[in-house]
């Protein structure tokens, strides 16, 4: 999740809201579209652009965008559920289960990730690293694997912490980009490895439909990890301290496993046995928190993480709520070409609302979508939550020019992975549910 710091001056926030809101009636004066683009999408695009430009104030920007888009819909276009405030209330009544599920999962997985960090396992992992350029390569592979069952943000932060130790904080810009890419790629084929794939799962799509994304993910890993590892080895070879004693807290690892099993078992049970009630109650998110609370006698979570986790979750949920109000019937038809383009779009715009739009529109092949929006954000440092989180640890990463110059292998790996999936599996759209 994005780092939330103190907000912008009130005047700037009000100016942004005024610009978006007061421009919308003028834009809509001649109809619901401007140059063929619905005003709804113009407002949504302005919100996402503001998130990219004012990345230190993402919560305030996202909430402002949500208020402006809601006000526009209430005043001018209405919703599929009706017009005015009544239509808005009915729309949010339909979306509340998804939003609560995501809130519980995002906050719960943040606490789960800290359980894993505090288990001592990250300190033991450097022992697995070989000498030479294979050392940084294996570290990227470890991050890729971790991201399959931990949130990609946690995987990036754990990987960055390990890298800071074994490379004495001398990390090449290309390798920093590769850490983000490994964390994003590793979660692309797992419904518990990335918020976007979890959203796809919550929508009723089988994890088996998402899993083939690992084909693209594995190809991309090889393509970017080898040159990135060579960059890092030339810049700063690996330095390991094999004499330091580390102890693994197996009880904490057990809590991590228990929470993941609870999440998977609940989602499978609901979709197979109680599918008719899946839209009525947030079973998935509640199950994670029940498991977390049941594990309290074994190990307590780091409750101090809650404020930042909740703030970051509210930011993402604001964008998801905005996306839910878009007229997706006016989007380009789903195709592999459209999906390929979404990967590049997600390098600039957050992949959470892009996934929400795709789910609402339908007609996608979900393994292609999972890889595209999951990995595509790696092409810029602010294109994914993992990138923003890692850049907070290593401020030198906050340079678009350096990221593009030294992370040249990231977009090449995206194209290689995408077309490998297209060649091996083929485009086969499936309906949700």
Image (tube, rainbow, N blue to C red):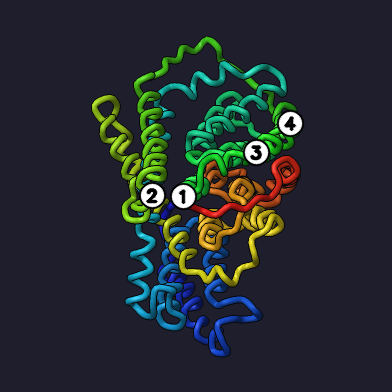
Query: Does 317 appear above or below 175?
Result: below
Please indicate whether residue 68 sits to the left or right of residue 166 in the image.
left
Residue under circle 1? 204
Look at the numbered disc 1 and give the secondary structure of its residue: loop
Q: Position of residue 226 (x, y in %)?
A: 73, 31
Mark nearest the camera among 2 and 4 is 2
Q: Position of residue 400 (x, y in %)?
A: 66, 52
Mark nearest the camera among 1 and 4 is 1
Query: Does 340 appear above or below 171?
Result: below
Earlier sequence position, callout 2 versus callout 1: 1
Q: Position of residue 118 (x, y in %)?
A: 40, 27
Residue under circle 2? 275
Q: Are marks 1 and 3 in contact (CB under 8 Å)?
A: no
Q: Are marks 2 and 1 in contact (CB under 8 Å)?
A: yes
Label 3 environment density (alpha carbons within 10 Å; few <14, some 14–19, many ≥20): many
- Residue at (56, 71) in percent of width and height: 41
Earlier sequence position, callout 2 versus callout 4: 4
- Residue at (40, 24) in percent of width and height: 253
Residue under circle 4? 226
Query: Does 291 appear above or below 66?
Result: above
Residue under circle 3? 217
User: Observer-nearest residue: 102 or 204?
Assistant: 204
Give the CA separation, mark 3 to mark 4: 14 Å
Look at the numbered disc 3 and give the secondary structure of its residue: helix
Give the CA separation, mark 1 to mark 4: 37 Å
User: Observer-nearest residue: 276 or 226?
Assistant: 276
Mark nearest the camera among 2 and 1 is 2
Can residue 105 be seen from the camera position used here? yes
Give the CA separation, mark 2 to mark 4: 44 Å
Look at the numbered disc 2 and give the secondary structure of its residue: helix
- The residue lying furthest to the bottom in this view is 30
User: Observer-nearest residue: 424 or 380?
Assistant: 424
């Amino acid at each position: 999740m994005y780092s939330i710091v103190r907000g912008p001056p009130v005047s700037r926030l009000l100016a942004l809201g005024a610009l978006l809101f007061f421009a919308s009636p003028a834009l809509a004066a001649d109809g619901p579209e401007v140059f063929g683009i619905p005003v709804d999408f113009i407002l949504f695009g302005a919100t996402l652009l503001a998130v990219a430009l004012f990345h230190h104030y993402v919560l305030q920007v996202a909430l402002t965008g949500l208020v402006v888009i809601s006000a526009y819909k209430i005043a001018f276009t209405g919703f599929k559920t009706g017009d005015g405030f009544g239509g808005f209330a009915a729309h949010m009544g339909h979306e509340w289960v998804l939003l609560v599920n995501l809130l519980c999962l995002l906050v719960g997985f943040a606490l789960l990730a800290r359980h894993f960090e505090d288990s001592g396992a990250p300190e033991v992992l450097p022992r697995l690293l070989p000498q030479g350029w294979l050392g940084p390569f294996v570290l990227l592979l470890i991050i890729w694997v971790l991201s399959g069952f931990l949130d990609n943000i946690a995987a990036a932060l754990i990987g960055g912490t390990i890298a800071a130790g074994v490379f004495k904080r001398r990390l090449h810009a290309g390798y920093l980009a590769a850490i983000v890419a490994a964390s994003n790629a590793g979660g692309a084929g797992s419904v518990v490895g990335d918020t976007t794939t979890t959203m796809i799962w919550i929508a009723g799509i089988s994890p088996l439909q998402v899993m083939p994304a690992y084909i693209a993910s594995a190809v991309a890993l090889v393509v970017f990890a080898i040159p990135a590892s060579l960059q890092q080895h030339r810049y700063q070879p690996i330095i390991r301290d094999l004499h330091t004693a580390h102890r693994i807290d197996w009880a904490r690892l057990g809590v991590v496993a228990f929470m993941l099993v609870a999440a998977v078992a609940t989602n499978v049970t609901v979709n197979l046995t109680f599918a008719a009630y899946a839209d009525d109650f947030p079973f998935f998110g509640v199950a994670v928190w029940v498991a977390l609370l049941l594990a309290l006698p074994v190990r307590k979570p780091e409750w101090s993480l809650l404020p930042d986790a909740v703030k970051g979750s509210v930011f993402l949920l604001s964008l998801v709520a905005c996306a839910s109000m878009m007229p997706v019937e006016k989007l380009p038809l789903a195709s592999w070409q459209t999906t390929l383009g979404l990967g590049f779009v997600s390098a600039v715009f957050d992949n959470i609302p892009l996934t929400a739009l795709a789910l609402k529109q339908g007609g996608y092949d979900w393994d292609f979508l999972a890889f595209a929006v999951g990995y595509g954000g790696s092409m810029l440092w602010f294109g994914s939550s993992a990138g923003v989180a890692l850049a907070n640890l290593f401020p030198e990463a906050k340079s678009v020019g350096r990221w593009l110059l030294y992370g040249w292998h990231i977009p090449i790996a995206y194209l290689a992975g995408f077309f490998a999936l297209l060649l091996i599996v083929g485009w086969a759209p499936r309906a949700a549910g």
